[in-house]
Image (tube, rainbow, N blue to C red):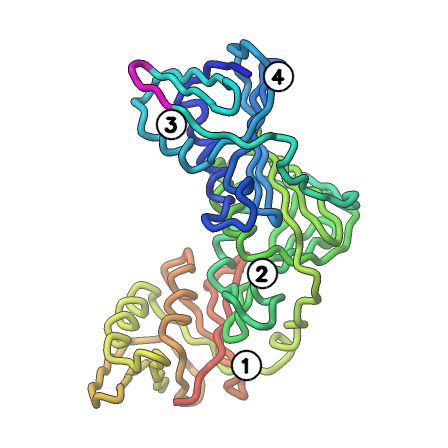
Amino acid sequence: MKFIIGRDQILAPLQQIVSVIEKRQTMPILSNVLLQASDDQLVMTGTDTEIQIVSKINIESILKSGEITVPARKFLDICRLLPPAAEVSFELQDDKVKLVSGRSRFSLSTLPAEHYPEFNESNYEYDFVLNAGKLKKALEKTVFCMANQDVRYYLNGLLLHVSNSRLKLVASDGHRLSIYEDDIGQATGCESRIILPRKAVQELSRLLDDPEAELNIQFSNNHIKLYYKDVVFSSKLIDAKFPDFSKVFNQSFMSPLLIQKQLLREALTRVAILSNEKYKGVTFDIAGDSLKLSTHNPEHDEAEEELVIDYQGEPLTISFNSQYMLDAVTNLDSEMAVLTIASNASSCFVEEPEQALFKFIVMPMRM
C-alpha cells in the first residue's frame, strides 16, 4: 500500500473522523482509522460501533492499493503539525506505516484491516433529500435542550419527526423543550418518528459546514444514514418512544409579554451572579409595563433589576432557572422576545414576535 496525498486534502476529513473515535476504547482497533486505497480513491473510516463516518478522497497518486488501520489521533496530529501545502508520502512496510513529508520521517504501528469491526446496518425504509443548512439550523435550535446522562435515556437524544413534506425536531431534558418545524421542500410520502442519540446529533451538527449542500437522508427503525458531499455518516438510533409533548399546547395562556431580547439577556446574566449556585433561580415579578428580576442565595446576597415591557395581563410572580431562560432567549434570532405563560403557570413559551420556525418552552421552578 503506497500513496502520496496533500496535507490540506487529508486534514479536514481526518478531523471529522477522529471526533467520532472515543479516547478510551475497550478494543484497541477502535482507536484506529481504517484506510483503504484503490482506484484513485482513499477511503477513511472511523467508528465507535454506535456511529460511523466514512470519508472518500479522490487522489491520483495511488502507487499501490491496499488497506490498513493506523492510530487515528497520532496520524491526525502528524498531519496537523506539518506545514500547509506539504505533501505526505504514505507507505506500508511489513506491519509499520512510513510517513515522509519534506525532511520529516514518521513510523506508525498498525493493526490489520480485516479485524476492523463492521458497522451492521439494517435495510433503509425511508429516503429523502434535504438542504444541509436547513438541518444544521434545526439542530442548532434544539441541541442545547437535550438531556445528558438522564435515566430516561430517550431524553438523551433528539426526536426527528418526518410527516410527508414536514420536518419536526424536538429536544427536552424534562425541564425545558425546544421545537423546530420546517418544510422539507418535497413530498417524502413517509410518516415516522426516530430518536437520534446525543453524540450523533453533536457530530452531525459539527459535520454540516456547507449551508448550500444537499443531504440525502435514509433511515429505518434502528439506523440513520446521511450522504453529505464526500462523507457518509451512519448512526444507530435510540429504541424508545419520545414522550407526547402536545398537551403543553392544548391549554389556556395569559397575555403575551413583549421585551427587548438583548436587555432581558443582559439583565438575567447580571442578576444570576447572586443566584443560588445549585438551583440558579431568578424570580420574575410582572405587573403593567414593568418586569422585576430578583434573586438571592444562602449567603444572603441579593440582586434586583427592573425592565420596561409591553404586557396587558394580570400581575404575576413566577421563577425560572436563569440558565434555561438565558439559553432560550439567546437562541432567538429576532430583536424582540415574546414570553407567554400558561394560565396555570406550568410553562412559559419563549418565541419570536413573527411566526418563527422554532419555539422554546421553559418550566418554572419553586423558590
Residue 229 in sight in this render: no
Reading the image, the residue beneath label 3 is 79
For the stretch drawn in magenta, the main secondary structure is strand
Q: Nearer the viewer, mark 3 or mark 1?
A: 3
Query: Disc 2 marks which residue?
Result: 157
The residue depicted at 41 percent of the width and 86 percent of the height is 318
In the rendered structure, the answer to whether residue 78 lies left or right of residue 47 reads left
* Residue depth check, mark 2 versus mark 1: number of the one nearer the observer: 2
Q: Which residues are magenta?
A: 102-106
Asked if residue 155 lies in the magenta stretch, the reply is no
Which residue corresponds to mark 1? 253
Q: Secondary structure at mark 1?
A: loop
Amino acid type of the residue that numbered disc 3 sits on in the rendered structure:
Cys
Tell which circle, 3 or 2, labels the residue nearer the N-terminal end: 3
Q: Is residue 34 above or below residue 330?
A: above
Badge 2 vs badge 1, beta-carbon distance below 8 Å: no
How many other residues sit within 10 Å of disc 1, few (<14), some (14-19) or many (≥20)?
some
Q: Amino acid at mark 1?
A: Phe
- Separation of marks 3 and 4 at Cα, in angstroms: 21 Å
Residue 243, image x and y in percent? 66, 71
